[in-house]
Amino acid sequence: MADGNSITGSSFTLRQFVAAGAERLKMEVVVGGRGLDHQVLEPMTNRPGLALTGFYGHFAWPRLQLVGLAENGYMESLDPKTRIARLQELIDRRAYCFIYACGIEVPEAVKALAEKAGVTILATKLLTREFAHQCTFVLEELRAPKTRIYGTTVEVAGIGVMMEGDSGLGKSETALGLIKHGNALVADDLTCLRKDIAANKLFARACDSTRNYMEIRGIGLIHVPSVFGVTAVCREKSLDLVVTFRRLNDIKGDLDRVGDDRRWRTFLGVNVPQLVIPVAAGRDLVNLVETAAQQFKLRVAGYDAAGDLDRRLKRLADEMRHGTAS
């Protein structure tokens, strides 16, 4: 089982950026070539207005250079020779990608300059501010630390629950039962985790190759939305609870019968609450996982059943000592 601490995805190329933002950013490659294999050094956009005027102090060359109507309007006000010279200055200062927004037509001279320098030029019909906003989400997702965990994840009553454990303990079968109860599959067998660095939170999704599919022993592969409808799948969900299945014989001396034992699983430096459920013949795992999710929601809301019972018993004991118990 993966330990959840092997980090990948913190660096990416322009080619990966174009692929990840194809739908959301509506980009097309105007000039690509070898420039598409360039690493995105700083996952942010930069409006190079000042640099285009000839002021290069604090020029953020590691970022993606976003050319909007203002920048393009200024460049069109220059004579063609000066215009190319200004762009060449930015390239000489290591700018490696220009993105033209608002459906701006990229001049042929600019294309030729980019081809010669191995610089990438992208274009989008989105407005500059809209592109900058949407681009932030794509870049954040690409640079986020990622890992893969052997586990099946389901959205249960609004809670992201990942079930893990040895092969053959019934994770997929439990997920199937949860789906039939109106819950939604996120990932079967292998869950991809992404860390939201700002919120220090994990998000789970399926690998692209297996999204929406499940493998059930004795039945084979099933396409979940075709069998149960589109609401039976969830593309991505926050990871709120880990349910670990273990054979009853393996944990007889380590069973939490009260519910006040707090356990955690750590992935990418983020602690996730863990619940260990013993697996034995006749146990209704679907019902247990659903109940665990509801119990987790109560804890988050501030209600602790074990603590409440403990306080009640202490109150009754005090009443009996003072002869006031009814």
Image (cartoon, rainbow, N blue to C red):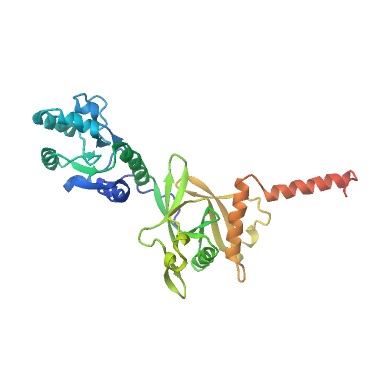
Number of callouts? 0
Q: Is residue 72 left or right of residue 6?
A: left
Name the image quarter holding residue 39. top left
Towards the viewer: 12 or 23:
23
Q: Residue furthest right?
A: 323
For image coordinates 61% across by 65% down, the residue present is: 248
Towards the viewer: 70 or 140:
70
Q: Is residue 91 left or right of residue 277?
A: left
For image coordinates 15% across by 31% down, the residue present is: 76
Q: Residue 193 at what x, y percent from top left?
A: 43, 52
Q: Does residue 99 appear in this view?
A: yes
Q: Residue 184 at what x, y percent from top left?
A: 49, 59
For image coordinates 35% across by 48% down, the residue present is: 9
Q: Is residue 204 above or below residue 168?
A: above
Name the image quarter holding residue 321. top right
Q: Residue furthest left?
A: 81
Q: Residue furthest bottom?
A: 218
Q: Does residue 89 appear in this view?
A: no
Q: Is residue 180 left or right of residue 112?
A: right
Q: Is residue 140 left or right of residue 274?
A: left
Q: Residue 7 at what x, y percent from top left?
A: 39, 48
Name the image quarter holding residue 233. bottom left
Q: Residue 179 at what x, y percent from top left?
A: 51, 63
Q: Is residue 146 above or below residue 217?
A: above
